[in-house]
Image (cartoon, helix red, strand yellow):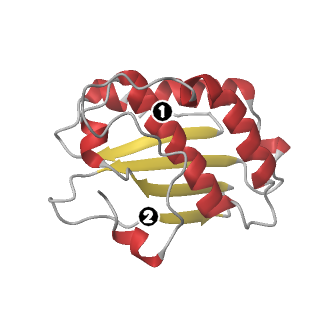
């Protein structure tokens, strides 16, 4: 296994329907974040953030709930988050997949890091948003009827979100 020394890491768990090339779009996002941001500027305790986004067909049980893990010994903060629209992600172009993952990361920051006293989440969110601006501003070109909207205005987090995957 190759060791990843990046401070911000994206990984995925997916249904076998999803094209591997689509899943690989997260590596580009990971690289531009690590080139432009340093986690040490936002926290003394958290030294690594891992986003594991789950693109699972909601018709194929079991659905995994969104969750977070704080690994205090290693300083790693892991966030597991479901892609909110499986079909939209499956049918996305590479640019659209990047936008979906970027928006999901921003959503995860607000959902899991915002209230932590040991992490400057508002500054981190703003800085991530600046790095992702060209991706977030990109126009959606897919002919798929559900692609073209934006996840940036994601619905407020509720108790039912733990089971949401559509």
Identify the residue at horizontal 71%, vertical 31% (top origin).
130
Mark 1 secondary-structure assignment: helix
Q: Is residue 157 above or below residue 140?
A: below
Q: State the image quarter where residue 37 is shown.
A: top right
Q: Residues within 10 Å of mark 2 (few under 14, many from 20)?
A: some
The residue where tag 1 is placed is 99
The outermost residue toward the bottom is 159
Number of marks present in the image shown = 2
* Image depth: mark 1 or mark 2 in front: 1
Q: Where's the N terminus, which quadrant?
A: top left
Circle 1 Cα neighbour tier, 10 Å, few/some/many (<14 / 14–19 / ≥20): many
The image quarter containing residue 121 is bottom right
Marks 1 and 2 close (CB-CB < 8 Å): no
Q: Give x and y (percent) for residue 63.
A: 27, 64
Counting residues from the N terminus, which is met first, the one under dot 1 or under dot 2? 2
Question: Mark 2: which secondary structure?
Answer: loop
Image location of residue 125, percent across then percent down: 71, 46
Residue 83: image location, x then y, percent: 38, 50
| Residue 3 placement (x, y as % from top left) | 52, 34
Quadrant of the snapshot with the C terminus: bottom left
Work out whether 22 lies above or below 9. Answer: above
| Disc marking residue 66 | 2
Q: Which residue is at a point 55% across and 56% down the rendered structure image? A: 78
Report the Cα–Cα distance between label 1 and label 2.
20 Å
Question: Above or below — where is 79 with respect to 11?
Answer: below
The residue under the point 68% across, 28% down is 131
Q: Is residue 87 left or right of residue 113?
A: left
Q: Is residue 128 left or right of residue 155?
A: right
């Amino acid at each position: 296994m190759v060791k990843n020394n990046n401070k911000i890491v994206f990984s995925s768990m997916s249904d076998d329907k999803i094209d591997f090339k689509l899943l690989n779009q997260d590596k580009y996002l990971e690289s531009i974040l690590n080139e432009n941001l340093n986690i040490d500027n936002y926290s003394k305790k958290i030294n690594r953030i891992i986003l594991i986004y789950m693109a699972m067909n909601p018709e194929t049980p079991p659905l995994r709930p969104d969750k977070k893990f704080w690994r205090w010994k290693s300083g790693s903060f892991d966030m597991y988050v479901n892609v909110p629209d499986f079909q939209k992600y499956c049918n996305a172009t590479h640019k659209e997949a990047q936008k979906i993952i970027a928006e999901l990361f921003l959503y995860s920051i607000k959902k899991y890091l915002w209230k932590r006293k040991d992490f400057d989440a508002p500054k981190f969110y703003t800085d991530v948003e600046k790095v992702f601006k060209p991706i977030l501003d990109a126009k959606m070109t897919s002919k798929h009827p559900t692609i073209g909207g934006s996840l940036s205005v994601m619905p407020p987090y509720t108790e039912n979100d733990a089971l949401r995957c559509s």
